[in-house]
Image (tube, helix red, strand yellow):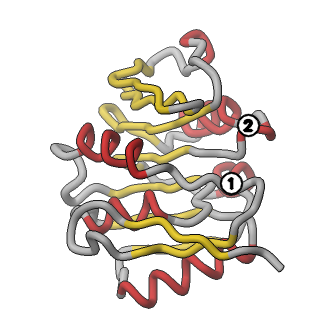
Amino acid sequence: MDAQSSIRIIGGKWRSRKVGFITKESLRPTPDRVRETLFNWLAPHILGAKCLDLYAGSGVLGFEALSRGAKSVVAIEKDRENYQQILQHSATLQADGLEAINKDVLDWLRETKFVADLVFVDPPYKQDILFTTLDLLEANTWVGINSLIYFEQDKPLEQALLPANWSVWRESKAGKVFYYLAVKER
């Protein structure tokens, strides 16, 4: 039987509320320290933002965004158990702005279209699909000019792998996690 763990929302209206998740090798919720830095970066941009949380996992990035004033979050999670937990937490928190979708991210990005203000991209590292995801976001116009895209990986960024009209606005490292906030400039 899988073990149950939890991670807390660190700011906003749901501050200190916990989001549970089933402990799995493929699931690494973004740690408090990284989320705190990320949402400090996003503070001037989060209020009223339309967000997309790809590879949502525990859903904590989306819940954190809603807690801090984002207008909406579309959370895409392929794993059925993770998806069910996101739905349970959404109901408990009465997170009206959250739409959870149980589907493969790459398939969903190829089929659906809308422009997000903020995008969170945290795929399983071992699948090596980060840059495929970022390319789909650009090619299928998921991000507009000045949209912000957060992503993390387990190695330093090779800037040349980003879409040509994106630039890294902020970056940091915590333990073995390298994390970045990029902006689409044109």
The residue under the point 57% across, 53% down is: 54
Q: In the shown orientation, is residue 58 left or right of residue 33?
A: right
Which residue lies under the disc numbered 1? Answer: 105
Vertical side of 22 occupied by 42: above or below: above
Dot 2 or dot 1, earlier in sequence: 1
Residue kind at label 1, given as amino acid type: Val
Residue kind at label 2, given as amino acid type: Ile
Q: Quadrant of residue 90?
A: bottom left
| Label 1 crowd (10 A; few <14 / some 14-19 / many >=20) | many
Q: How many marks?
A: 2
Q: Position of residue 50 (x, y in %)?
A: 34, 57
Image quadrant in which the C terminus is located = top left
Q: Position of residue 74 (x, y in %)?
A: 48, 64
Query: In this orientation, which residue lies closer to the viewer: 145 or 11?
Result: 11
Query: In this orientation, which residue lies closer to the viewer: 46 or 60?
Result: 60
Q: Which mark is residue 156?
A: none
* For discs 2 and 1, the disc positioned in front in the rendered view: 2
